[in-house]
């Protein structure tokens, strides 16, 4: 699938100037100028859309004005206007259309329309949500990438059990806010980049295979012609294990909130 086929229904080509800003491109370098993340740099110039992940529950109703593309994320965004005349960008859920009315409120919703936002304790078990907070008022952090949705599994003791797209079941405080529905643009996973030049436009620089290097440069390097890895498990550029190696800290403080690990 090309990058244009699934964007035919977007209703605006240019963002609203008062809702965009600039982010300094660091090209994978730290504060001293050293490369800490390889294969980053270049890319097309782009404006950062200031997306409202908090969406105060006191805002009330809003009307969707546009559905737009955001170069900084995989999902589409929607520009909404509240009754007081304020406008903001929000994550667009699947099925949201221009002219639709979405609601942000603190109590239970009368109807569960895509894009409506309220507290987790006011939503029935089995509801699919996105843009979920980890702390009340902090802003959505879970379920923000294209096509994802978080399922409400159970509610007990002031917490709600959520099943994440990875299969992990996690406890979140019931006063945290979430939006109803699933994130837009599920076709993003089927997009084929197609050529190296498009990757460069996305800010991705070329990657050299470890097997093509010399032994001094990579654990997989060396050999005459095309040689196998010669190791039981593959390693990265610095000799650390990859592919299936657990990277989560064993004593992470948030481990107590995980009910079931991902597979």
Image (cartoon, grey):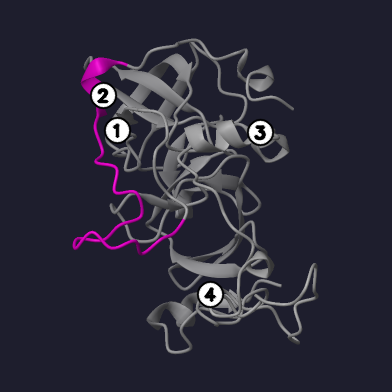
Between label 3 and label 1, give the one nearer the viewer: 3
- The residue indicated by pointer 3 is 195
Give me the C-alpha separation between circle 4 and circle 2: 46 Å
Mark 4 is surrounded, within 10 Å at the Cα level, by few (under 14), some (14 to 19) or many (20 or more) other residues, namely some
Where residue 76 appears, as percent x and y from the top left, is 51, 29
Q: Give the magenta range.
A: 16-38
Q: Which residue is mark 2?
A: 19
- Residue drawn at point x = 34 percent, y = 34 percent: 51
State the residue position of label 4.
217
Picture coordinates of residue 135, whole percent (x, y): 33, 61
Q: Are marks 1 and 2 in contact (CB under 8 Å)?
A: yes
Q: Classify mark 2: residues with Cα within 10 Å, few (<14), some (14-19) or many (20+).
A: some
Q: List x then y, in percent, for residue 69.
A: 48, 24
State the image quarter where residue 83 is shown: top left
Q: Are marks 4 and 3 in contact (CB under 8 Å)?
A: no
Q: Give the vertical position of 35 relative to 143 (above or below).
A: below
**Circle 1 SS class:** loop
Q: Secondary structure at mark 4?
A: loop
Task: Name the residue that disc number 1 marks.
Answer: 50
Which of pointers 4 and 2 indicates the residue nearer the eye?
4
For numbered disc 2, what is the local secondary structure?
A: helix
């Amino acid at each position: 699938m090309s990058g244009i086929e699934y964007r035919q229904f977007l209703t605006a080509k240019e963002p609203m100037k008062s809702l965009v800003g600039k982010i300094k491109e660091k090209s994978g370098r730290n504060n001293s100028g050293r490369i800490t993340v390889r294969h980053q740099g270049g890319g097309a110039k782009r404006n950062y859309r200031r997306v409202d992940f908090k969406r105060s529950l006191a805002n009330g109703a809003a009307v969707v004005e546009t559905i737009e593309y955001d170069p900084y994320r995989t999902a589409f965004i929607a520009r909404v206007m509240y009754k007081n005349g304020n406008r903001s960008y929000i994550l667009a859920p699947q099925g949201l259309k221009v002219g639709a009315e979405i609601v942000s409120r603190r109590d239970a919703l009368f109807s569960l329309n895509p894009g409506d936002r309220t507290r987790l304790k006011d939503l029935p078990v089995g509801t699919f949500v996105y843009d979920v907070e980890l702390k009340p008022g902090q802003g959505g952090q879970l379920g923000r990438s294209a096509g994802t949705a978080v399922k409400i599994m159970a509610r007990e003791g002031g917490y709600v059990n959520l099943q994440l797209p990875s299969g992990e079941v996690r406890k979140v405080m019931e006063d945290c806010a979430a939006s109803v529905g699933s994130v837009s643009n599920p076709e993003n996973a089927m997009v084929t980049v197609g050529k190296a030049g498009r990757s460069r436009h996305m800010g991705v620089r070329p990657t050299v295979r470890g097997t093509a290097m010399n032994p001094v440069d990579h654990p997989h390097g060396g050999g005459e012609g095309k040689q196998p890895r010669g190791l039981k498990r593959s390693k990265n550029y610095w000799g650390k294990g990859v592919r299936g190696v657990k990277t989560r800290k064993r004593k992470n403080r948030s481990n107590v909130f995980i009910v079931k690990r991902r597979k």
